Amino acid sequence: MWLPNQCVVEQVVVLKAPPEEVYAFINNPAEWPKWTILNKKTDPSVIHLYAGPMQGKGARMQWSGDKVGNGQLIITESTNPYSITYVQKEEGGEDTTRGEFVLQQVNRGTMVHWKQRTPLADNPLGRVQGAIRKYKKQNELQQSLQGLNNLISNNSKRRASK
């Protein structure tokens, strides 16, 4: 039986905003709790800590919560306003997730392509657990991008009402 040696998840969405606006929410880890599942709505006990520069390469976020667990995210590369790469490590996990956002201007806004890759343990159990992890991570990305869409829509409505 052949099973993959890494968990790869990706989502694509088109947001009604220019790349610069979308990029600002992704490039600053302090903005992530506003749109990802790592927030008080998902886990009221979650606490966030930030280090390094506030945005771009080297910006860091740590989180700790009863439901979302403990982990950290570090932005490793940032090209304004088109791409961001990061590494993410969750406590209790031996593997490091590598993630990337690619933003592309399209006719009606910005296409956001979010991809994550996590190596899996080199044994049958680890590979089977990877299928469960993929399902969970796919849902997390989908919910987070919906949160980003809602945040950008609300910002647009606020600007329009001024």
Image (cartoon, grey):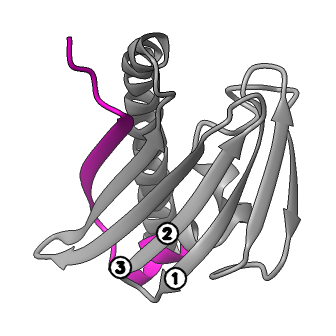
Q: Position of residue 28 (x, y in %)?
A: 65, 71
Residue at 36% across, 33% down: 5
Secondary-structure class at tag 1:
strand
55 up-or-down from 2: above or below: below
97 up-or-down from 56: above or below: above
Residue at 84% across, 29% down: 65
Q: Nearer the viewer, residue 24 or 16?
A: 24
Q: CA distance from mark 1 to mark 3?
A: 13 Å
Residue farthest left in this picture: 107
**Residues at badges 1 and 3 in contact (C-beta under 8 Å)?**
no
Q: Quadrant of residue 63?
A: top right
Which labelled disc corresponds to residue 78? 1
Q: Position of residue 81 (x, y in %)?
A: 41, 85
Circle 2 is placed at which residue position? 85
Residue at 85% across, 64% down: 50
Q: CA distance from mark 2 to mark 1?
A: 7 Å
**Residues at badges 2 and 3 in contact (C-beta under 8 Å)?**
no
**Residues at badges 2 and 1 in contact (C-beta under 8 Å)?**
yes
Dot 3 crowding, Cα within 10 Å, few <14, some 14–19, many 20+? many
Circle 3 is placed at which residue position? 19
Q: 78 left or right of 52?
A: left
74 up-or-down from 55: above or below: above
Dot 1 crowding, Cα within 10 Å, few <14, some 14–19, many 20+? many
Q: CA distance from mark 2 to mark 3?
A: 16 Å
Q: Quadrant of residue 109?
A: bottom left
Instruction: Report how many numbered discs are placed on residues in the image.
Output: 3
Mark closest to the chain's N terminus, 2 or 3? 3
Secondary-structure class at tag 3:
helix
Mark closest to the chain's N terminus, 1 or 3? 3
Task: Tell me which segment is drawn in magenta.
Answer: 1-24
